[in-house]
Amino acid sequence: MKQFVVIPKFKENTKEITYFEPRIVKIVKGESITWINRDTKVHNLTSGDANSTLPSPFFQTGSMLPGESTTVKIDSNQQSIPYYCTMHPSERGVIGMLPKPEDQMTEDEKARFLDDLNLSISDNANQKILTRLQRQLDPAIIEYLSDPHATLIQNRVMTIVFWDISNFSKLTEIFKDHPELIAVFLNEYLGVAVPIIHEYGGIIDKFIGDGIMAYFGFKETDADGSIGASNAIIAALKIKKAFQFFKKNWLDIWSTVTNLDTNIDIKCGINTGSVLVGLMGSQERDQFTVIGTHVNLASRMEGIAETDQIVISQYTKEKVSQKFNMETIQIKEEKIKAFEDITEYYVVIGQN
């Protein structure tokens, strides 16, 4: 079943301004909504909080010219989904997710649903908490955990990636009297890297100082993890390229403060294998994360990597076959701790 929402022509000098008709549209999970733009302006709708700059996990309509319409299928387990126009942020609406078709609900069920929906809409304190949580958790994880039937811990084949900035400790020592330069640099670097990771389906597990740990393959349905492995390497290559332009700008900034005699680059370690993913922790505090020996091996790969290298394990190589150009490196002397049977690793040069 499809529901319709009209964006009416804006009328000035009216006591009550209507941005969406209806403002609250009620649907069942899996149904579609068609927005029809009857206004004289362009509108671009996105789910989320208009006061937040966080990415939306549910939908974006794209630009709708006057007279155009856009249909979006809504698959969500949240009770309510706020949305707004990115071009006119004061224009806001709400999608109420019904537990079942409205004509199958009793009057008591309808009343309870409206009470819960109104509470959800009006509870600004909880919305602020949710906004903060969205900065801590990937939108895909929030969506996953909102499903009451979700498996809280599961075994999945995924690709784990560790990034690290070489010589970062030396950099912090050089600028110990100007910590603000390091803080802004690090935030801007993460602002470059994180969107690329998200673009290729990666989920940020944590920031470790100047390092990033992420995993790929959670959103995909490929049982062998090959899609996640390919996406992880492509993301690593894009971050490596983006970092070169980003670094040049910061080297110029730092040179105005001191004669910098050190270079910085990122290095990356990647491994694919079966891991436990889900909520780990105690009753007081838990965390959605991944654990297992293959996580440890990804960290070892990052430790092996030299400056400006993307190093992958043999397990990841098996998943990506001929998709990437890579150099084989034999481990001749010191073996990888806890992985002594591994005799070689691979440095990714680029895509084939």
Image (cartoon, rainbow, N blue to C red):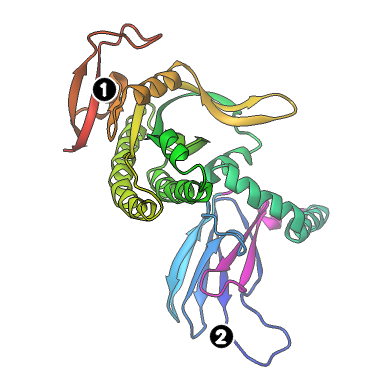
Q: Is residue 93 left or right of residue 236?
A: right
Q: Is residue 24 left or right of residue 258?
A: right
Q: Is residue 220 above or below residue 23?
A: above
First in sequence, mark 2 or 1: give its number: 2
Residue 51 placement: quadrant: bottom right
Q: Report, in whole angstroms, how far the alpha carbon at label 2 lies from the one at label 1.
A: 57 Å
Image coordinates for residue 349, horizontal then vertical, percent:
20, 34
Name the residue rendered at 40%, 50% in the picture. Answer: 192
Quarter of the image that includes the N terminus: bottom right
Please state the extent of the stretch shown in magenta in the rendering: 76-105
Residue 139 magenta-highlighted = no
Q: Which residue is mark 2?
A: 9
Instruction: Look at the numbered disc 2 and give the secondary structure of its residue.
Output: loop
Q: Which residue is mark 1?
A: 318
Name the residue rendered at 41%, 31% in the picture. Answer: 162
Q: Is residue 126 above or below residue 348?
A: below
Amino acid found under the numbered disc labelled 2: Lys
Image coordinates for residue 213, horizontal then vertical, percent:
46, 33
Amino acid found under the numbered disc labelled 1: Glu
Instruction: Look at the numbered disc 1 and give the secondary structure of its residue.
Output: helix
Name the residue rendered at 54%, 46% in the picture. Answer: 139
Viewer-nearest residue: 150 or 328: 328
Viewer-nearest residue: 295 or 231: 295
Q: Is residue 239 visible?
A: yes
